[in-house]
Amino acid sequence: GTRESKVFYLKMKGDYHRYMAEFKVGDERKNAAEDTMNSYKAAQDIALADLAPTHPIRLGLALNFSVFYYEILNSSDKACSMAKQAFEEAIAELDTLGEESYKDSTLIMQLLRDNLTLWTSDSQDQLDEP
């Protein structure tokens, strides 16, 4: 529906600014990061209210938003909690998955879990450093 299109559009906008933030420095990076945050946040507000936890667009948003927290904002705690919550909420409603989005949704869930595994082992490595 239209809510779905709106989330998709805002996510794309956030993705664009996130890619920009990766290549910019100083104020330009800061501005791109703010634009990313605003777009993702607006998308998330609609997604959490209107899309099922297993919806591929909602999952994709959680994936990219969490990567933004991890890579651009260097906030691994927030990245991990966001990815973990999205994954667990989707798992809890797996039986609601439609045939058509099953592949998409489970693929993104796999990516969320892969990131979680990677990020938690990264932070463990940092703790282990002498």
Image: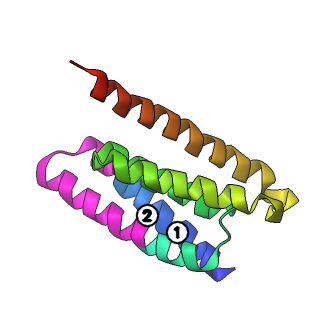
**Residue wearing tag 2:** 13
Residue 101 image position (x, y, % from top left): 78, 57
Q: Nearer the viewer, residue 42 or 115?
A: 115
Q: Nearer the viewer, residue 32 or 129?
A: 129
Residue 59 image position (x, y, % from top left): 60, 58
CA gap, disc 1 and disc 2: 6 Å
The residue located at (42%, 47%) in the rendering is 67
Overall secondary structure of the magenta section: helix
Q: Is residue 81 left or right of residue 130?
A: right
Q: Is residue 63 above or below residue 31?
A: above
Dots 1, 2 in contact, CB < 8 A: yes
Residue 42 image position (x, y, % from top left): 43, 74
Q: Is residue 52 above or below residue 110?
A: below
Taking the view exactly as shown, the residue that stands out farthest to the top is 130
How would you rate the neighbour count of disc 2 (Cα within 10 Å): few for under 14, some for 14-19, many for 20 or more?
some
Taking the view exactly as shown, the residue that stands out farthest to the right is 99
**Residue wearing tag 1:** 9
Label 2, secondary structure: give it: helix
Task: Please report the bounds of the magenta region as a residue range.
Answer: 19-41
